[in-house]
Image (cartoon, helix red, strand yellow):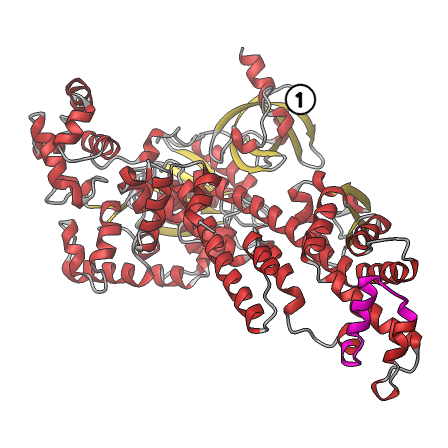
Amino acid sequence: MDISAKLTEEFNLRPDHVKNVLSLLEEGNTIPFIARYRKEMTGAIDDQVLRNLNDRYEYLKNLEKRKEEVAKAITEQEKMTEEIQSAIDAAQTMTEIEDVYRPFKQKKKTRASVAIEKGLKPLAEFILAQQGDPYKEAEKYIDEEKGVKDVNEAIAGAKDVIAEVVSDNAELRKKLRGLLEKHGEMQVKLVKDDERGTYAMYADYSEFVPEIKNHRILAINRGEKEDCLKAKIFFEPDIAKRVCVSKYVKDKRETVCAKLIEEAAADGYDRLIEPSIQREVRAILTDRAGEQAIKMFEVNLRPLLLQPPVKGKVTLGLDPGYRTGCKVAVVDETGKVLDTSVIYPVPPKNDIEGAKRIVKYLIEKHNVDVISIGNGTASKETEIFVADLLKEIDRNVTYAVVNEAGASVYSASPLAVEEFPDYDLTLRSAISIARRLQDPLSELIKIDPKSIGVGQYQHDMDKKRLDGVLGGVLEDCVNSVGVDLNTASVSLLKYVAGLNAGIAKNIVSYREENGKFTSRPQLLKVSKLGAKAYEQCAGFLRIPDGKNIMDNTAVHPESYKKAEKLLSLFGYSDEDVRARRLAQLPAKVKEFGEDKAAEYCELDKATMNDIIAELVKPGRDIRDSLPARQLRKDIMGIEDLAVGMEVDGVVRNVIDFGAFVDIGVHQDGLVHISEITDKYIRHPSDVLKVGQQVKAVIISLDKGKQRIGLSLKQAKKQAN
């Protein structure tokens, strides 16, 4: 297989770009580096396409490797034929290559292997040839020493061999698998249910396989795992058996052999094929559903990590709780802990006045600008307390409710202990909640992505695959934002292209021993950070007050001289960059001619335009261009809502059938996919993303069950 040609066709890319990408990957270049600094070689393919291409490349390489292993194993058995080699070459999936290899695998003791030991394989071949009387032929195989007492035992053994031959036929298995996928029916029965009635809808459920939604596949799988459901894919066995028989019966006029083959094929289907392809099709459906769930997690995680930070504000973090109280932590503009406390403004203590005294004192003492409230247990009561308190103070303080998912996981982790050895885990959680508002990326990066709470069924996914995809998202987000080399934690640095946890620790150690970095080339003095790692990481690390202003941009050191040539061409200097006097540079370049300017500076046009964007705004944060987080001063409860009311909201989670939206009443509302827009969309993620601010109309309300139905398309109609 020409892997490069196949990828070119599948991804609809230029052949030279694909070859360049594969070459860059084989040389050990990271995806963020390729996406950002090798655009001229790749046609400016973005990082997500690069990751998908890399995943597919790895699969195809493994497929080719497995083909070679199978071909070698069959050749060593001296059973290789042109037909088998063609089947190996034509295999497009791992399942298909395993089907080809199935007849040649060392099997455990089976009915067929027992019959073969008794010498009955030639009789099976005679029957399959359909050229004589099988019962007369069977008389030759009667041998009491081998355990073949009579003709019937010989025929029965031969049928066992035929049943296995039918089962091992790769072409037949592929056809039957396809029939199950296209025409099978998923049938589910309820064995027991939990107290919440989680699986009630599956009490007596059936749906054709091509129509079943991915999230239902995962729900059924979980129900089986919890012994609540029993599921199987039903396909009419008579049709399947006729397909098996038609593969081997040449002439139905030869009735005796044909009848025996028919019986053997039916037995082979019932006993060997059906249970096996049932598992295979379930695995295919699970893989497909799992990939979709992982994709949704990826789609949700990216905007969550890239939420705009609330910069330059002293923040008071509140981790709500009932019996153990509400933990308080005040952090300065850089996230440094200034103070901690515990208050009890909610049941059972209800010490509202005492809690107000403490919070007012902390606000005044540290000039607090904003309060960050975790959205977990007792969040609603804590939010009411904060909204009331803010009415009683003169200072302009606002608040926001942040997603606290994973805060408790982080606070009990070795990393949290290392960061805050002097605080107990409850206070660490409050610190994390405060910092999540200040810089979501820097804080959320410390938490296992599966605990962040923006996916579905993530704990049911293949761990290695999920970790690989989510690690890619973390890496892309960190590198697209850039990292301050002099303040970044090990947790953040380890996701920078070319670095790992060990080198990240060495960078922090070097910083602690030698003081702040003043230039990017100093990185080469860090233990175990060699030339290749430097090439990969340098452009993503920022030094805001470094000697060279370009060290505070995404311009790669390899392009510094070319960037200086560009500045000189249009009469600018480094000092102009530092003073931000380059607003007219893009217009001047266009007037001069982009192609001509790029050629003069020895740059490709895409890289030149990236450099211009960086020089115009050194130290820019891509998150600053996104809509700022909504900060509130007052609160609304579900009891204040009514059908028909228009509300502002923020998308919290996008799922296959809609999206959950925070409208500020503690309970998220659900927008079904049918209520997102009047236009056709394949998936909610086509138009919505986590953190997006939206207007919605309440279309249904069940205050008892705390359910809120929302419509975005009705809000748009009202606006028009």
Left or right, residue 390 beside residue 682: left
User: Looking at this view, is 466 or 203 the one in front?
Assistant: 466
User: Looking at this view, is 718 or 463 the one in front?
Assistant: 463
Residue drawn 92% across and 62% down?
Answer: 256
User: Looking at this view, is 699 or 114 the one in front?
Assistant: 114
Question: For mark 1, what is the residue?
Answer: 643
Magenta span contains residue 165: no
Q: Where is residue 113 in the image (x, y as percent from the top left)?
A: 75, 75
Seen in the picture, residue 282 relative to 436 is either above or below; the reply is below
Residue 402 shows in the view: no
Q: Which amino acid does label 1 sit on?
A: Val
- Furthest residue toward bottom: 145
Q: Is the magenta stretch mostly helix, strand or loop?
A: helix
Q: Position of residue 507 (x, y in %)?
A: 23, 59
Q: Position of residue 243 (x, y in %)?
A: 79, 50
Secondary structure, mark 1, is loop
Residue drawn 41% across and 52% down?
Answer: 341
Seen in the picture, residue 625 relative to 299 is either above or below; the reply is above
Quadrant where the C terminus is found in the figure: top right
**Magenta highlight range:** 116-135
Q: Where is residue 408 in the image (x, y as percent from the top left)?
A: 49, 55
